Amino acid sequence: MPEMLVLPPDSFALVTGASSGIGEAIAERLAARGVSLILASRSLPKLEALRSDWSARYRVAVETIAVDLSEPDGPARLWAATEGAGRTVSLLVNNAGFGLNGAEAELPLERTAEMIRLNVGATAELTHRFLVAMRSRRSGWILNVASTAAFLPGPWFGTYSATKAFVLSFSQALHEEARRDGVTVTCLCPGYTRTGFQAAAGMKPADETPLFPVMSAGAVAEAGLAALERGQPVVVPHFLDRLWIASLRLFPRSFPPRLAAAFFRRSRRQGA
Ligand SMILES: NC(=O)c1ccc[n+]([C@@H]2O[C@H](COP(=O)([O-])OP(=O)(O)OC[C@H]3O[C@@H](n4cnc5c(N)ncnc54)[C@H](OP(=O)(O)O)[C@@H]3O)[C@@H](O)[C@H]2O)c1
């Protein structure tokens, strides 16, 4: 692990949504570098399987916490079981999240509200709670996972894009504030990544996208950790995604949502 990211002794990296996809890939890369881990998500059996595999393979301490972060008291319970219970968290990875592809008026309101509570509410609350502790120690790292969707209002993906725009804006603002207190905040904005995300969002598989580049969870995890180590505020891992995001500035504000509409209207899986 690069020097900046050597965590203080007896401290942990806490990864939310560590049971699969990008969160699992980030957590495994940290374990491989000797970092002690706390893995959090809803499915304890998956986390326990990772714990027994990684603690044997990488010889690191791995703890697991089952928590539903979309429940109103989920973030507070995760805090209470970690920092609140005397475990120092030097690195927080706010990764747990999901999307919903479809017409806003046709999506179930309860799922939409759950997505806002998880993607926005839990990310904001956990960032706040752990930032207070990190600031008092004048040391810490926070990696928030947004999306390339954060840069573009996405019709048929509207609430999801807006939740990720929140994560991006919040993280960029806190990057400026927190660096004065010795805390690095980095926002990871992946594009299409091969994970369980597309199935959960009711979308066609990542490799069926005709427009956007597709990455592995491992490559996205590497890009996020490298950016955190460099103290970068934002990272978009794929250069083609960086290219279309930069090109958005050339158009009037009304054009990108029209372009996105043409794509996301068709990205929903038949029968989802
Ligand atoms: N894949 C992509 O194309 C893509 C692109 C851009 C951004 N992202 C973002 O990347 C992050 C990770 O997604 P992924 O692609 O790795 O998808 P994934 O494979 O579906 O992983 C999602 C993770 O979040 C956890 N999770 C979901 N709901 C939760 C809840 N209520 N409480 C606690 N944990 C919960 C899941 O674990 P349990 O089911 O065990 O709870 C799982 O570990 C998300 O924030 C997503 O928006 C993904």
Image (tube, rainbow, N blue to C red):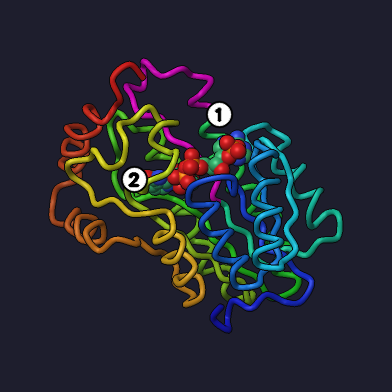
Q: What residue does disc 1 label? A: 114
Q: Residues within 10 Å of mark 2 (few under 14, many from 20)?
A: many
Q: Amino acid at mark 2?
A: Ala
Secondary element under disc 1, as helix, strand or loop, is helix
Q: Quadrant of residue 245?
A: bottom left
Q: Under tag 2, what secondary structure? A: helix
Q: Which residues are magenta?
A: 95-114
Q: Is residue 112 magenta?
A: yes
Q: Which residue is mark 2?
A: 149
Residue 184 - label: none
Q: Is residue 82 left or right of residue 182?
A: right
> Is the CB of the residue bearing disc 2 within 8 angstroms of ligand 1?
yes
The yes-or-no answer for disc 1 within 8 Å of ligand 1 is: yes
Residue at the bottom extreme of this rendering = 3
Q: Residue at x 28, y 20 (%)?
A: 270
The amino acid sitting under disc 1 is Glu
